[in-house]
Image (cartoon, rainbow, N blue to C red):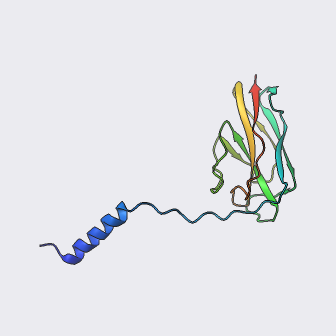
Amino acid sequence: MTNPAHWLATLSLVLLLAAPARAEDPIPRTPSPAGAVLYIVSPKDGETVASPVTVIFGLRGMGVAPAGVPTPSTGHHHLIVDAPLPAENAAIPADANHIHFGGGQTETSVAFFPGPHTLQLVLGDANHVPHQPPVVSPQIKITVK
């Protein structure tokens, strides 16, 4: 016969593995001031442009600070290219569609393949998490010739 303590440990492990995953504690969100506005200065919505494209970021009602610097009412830019906005309660991913500007940059030059593209900005806090409420620009559409 099997050792009862061993059987109980095995059963506990099986039940633990079969239990549904619990939600993680939410990531703390940094408040954004009322009236903060994020926008793309250039290119303009609907514009046809040549690659590489200079994208200039605009921000009113908040300041720009590098990633890792927890200063109230500041954040840093993330350019979302050809993708939906990331989740509001998680760090913004860093990949070809989610370009981080953690140094506090306010413009960039991006090489694009010819064709239609969408661009949108989201401001991230010191930890790359969108503010509460999120500060996002309208999405614009451009065509690269």
Answer with the quarter of the image where residue 115 lies.
top right
Asked if one can make out residue 134 in the rendered structure from this viewpoint, the answer is yes
Q: Is residue 17 left or right of residue 49?
A: left
User: Is the N terminus in the top left, top right, bottom left or bottom right quadrant?
Assistant: bottom left
Q: Where does the image place residue 121, in percent across and percent down from the top left? A: 75, 45
When the figure is inspected, residue 5 is found, relative to residue 85, above or below; the finding is below
Taking the view exactly as shown, the residue that stands out farthest to the left is: 1
> What residue is shown at x 85% (from left), y 54% (from top)?
35
> What residue is shown at x 84% (from left), y 33% (from top)?
44
When the figure is inspected, residue 41 is found, relative to residue 28, above or below; the finding is above
Q: Is residue 60 left or right of residue 91?
A: right
Asked if one can make out residue 112 in the rendered structure from this viewpoint, the answer is no
Q: Where does the image place residue 29, in percent across and percent down from the top left? A: 69, 62
Taking the view exactly as shown, the residue that stands out farthest to the right is: 60
Taking the view exactly as shown, the residue that stands out farthest to the top is: 145
> What residue is shown at x 82% (from left), y 36% (from top)?
54
Q: How many marks?
A: 0
